[in-house]
Image (spheres, rainbow, N blue to C red):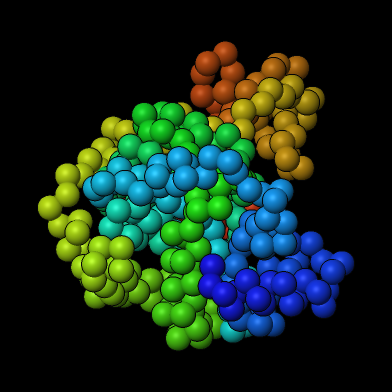
């Protein structure tokens, strides 16, 4: 963090001592154009509490010797010109500082995190290690299961490591400066249209200080890459579960799941069925046999799961 950011955190905290780190982060961003994470605020205001005795050893772990060894992922909240909130999820290569994927969504959901991660693996490479934020959309077991399926080491951010996700904080600051503040987007559709050009600018035109002025694309050009295969992607689509619960079919042939009722069939009355949420939607299974599927995200966001898969992965 810069001296100006640290000063702003302390001054705003003095003015609004009743606010927690989350609300301070929002206030700093919206009112003072200072964009820092809640963990950065906690480390400034409570340095002793969030201090590690082995920081130097841990920090070395986050600077890799070549591309595609470690990726970093994080979510950033953006307020658009129409007042709506969107969430940017980006995946960055540790060595080159290049963006492997950048997507925007209307909500913070594990479903969207997984889509973005898989897009990065599909377009570029599977890394050996994957470092990510520990927010709710990451810290619920789904991301860990995905990485385990693909043989990738899971590296969640540690509260006591002040430099664990510093690269992403700097990248977010640049995204605001060169993308959102510059373009002043009104809606999410205009952001999506502009993303490909911004990634080209970030990877192909903007020099990286960490790589002595070279662009990320120049660094990545001859790097060995192992993109996600069709077979691996299909396995993830079929086997990665966002939820897996048992329910009994009611007399009307329906089961209740997350506040909604799904019609399985009256012939199934009294039987126990397994409800799985996968990338394709809500699925009902009985004794290991597939029964029925609904496009889960259609009911949550007005978006069909199949459409999202085709848009980002297929």
Q: Residue at 46%, 80% (x, y): give it.
A: 177
Q: Nearer the viewer, residue 209 or 229?
A: 209
Instruction: State which quarter of the image contains the N terminus.
Output: bottom right
Where is residue 192 shown, x and y percent of the image? 43, 71
Q: x and y percent of residue 235 in the render?
A: 37, 30
Give the residue drawn at x 55%, y 64%.
76
In this orientation, which residue lies closer to the viewer: 142 or 214?
A: 214
Corner quadrant of residue 174: bottom left
Residue depicted at 26% across the width and 38% down the height: 229
Q: Is residue 128 above or below residue 272?
A: below
Out of 219 and 62, give the one closest to the viewer. Answer: 62
Does 176 sit above or below residue 54? Answer: below
Q: Is residue 281 visible?
A: no
Would you place residue 222 above or below residue 151 in this image?
Answer: below
- Name of the residue lying farthest toward the top: 287
Q: Count the numbered circles shown.
A: 0
In the displayed orientation, state which residue is furthest to the right: 18
């Amino acid at each position: 963090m810069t001296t100006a950011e640290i000063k702003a955190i302390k001054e705003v905290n003095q003015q609004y001592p009743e606010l927690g780190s989350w609300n301070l982060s929002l206030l700093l961003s919206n009112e003072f154009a200072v964009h820092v994470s809640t963990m950065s605020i906690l480390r400034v205001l409570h340095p002793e509490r969030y201090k590690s005795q082995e920081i130097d050893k841990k920090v070395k772990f986050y600077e890799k010797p070549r591309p595609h060894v470690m990726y970093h992922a994080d979510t950033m909240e953006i307020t658009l010109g129409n007042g709506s909130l969107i969430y940017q999820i980006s995946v960055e290569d540790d060595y080159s500082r290049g963006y492997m994927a950048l997507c925007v969504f209307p909500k913070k959901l594990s479903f969207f995190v997984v889509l973005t991660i898989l897009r990065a693996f599909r377009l570029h490479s599977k890394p050996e290690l994957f470092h990510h934020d520990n927010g709710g959309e990451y810290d619920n077991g789904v991301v860990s299961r995905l990485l385990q399926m693909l043989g990738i080491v899971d590296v969640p951010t540690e509260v006591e490591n002040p430099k664990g996700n510093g690269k992403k904080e700097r990248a977010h600051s640049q995204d605001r400066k060169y993308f959102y503040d510059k373009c002043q987007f009104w809606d999410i559709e205009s952001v999506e249209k502009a993303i490909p050009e911004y990634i080209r600018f970030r990877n192909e035109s903007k020099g990286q200080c960490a790589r002595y002025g070279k662009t990320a694309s120049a660094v990545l050009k001859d790097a060995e890459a192992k993109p996600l295969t069709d077979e691996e992607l299909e396995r993830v689509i079929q086997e990665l579960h966002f939820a897996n619960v048992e329910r009994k079919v009611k007399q009307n042939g329906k089961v209740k799941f997350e506040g909604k009722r799904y019609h399985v069939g009256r012939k199934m009355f009294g039987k126990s069925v397994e409800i799985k949420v996968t990338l394709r939607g809500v699925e009902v299974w009985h004794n290991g046999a597939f029964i029925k599927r609904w496009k889960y995200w259609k009911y949550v966001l007005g978006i069909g799961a199949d459409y999202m898969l085709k848009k980002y992965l297929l």
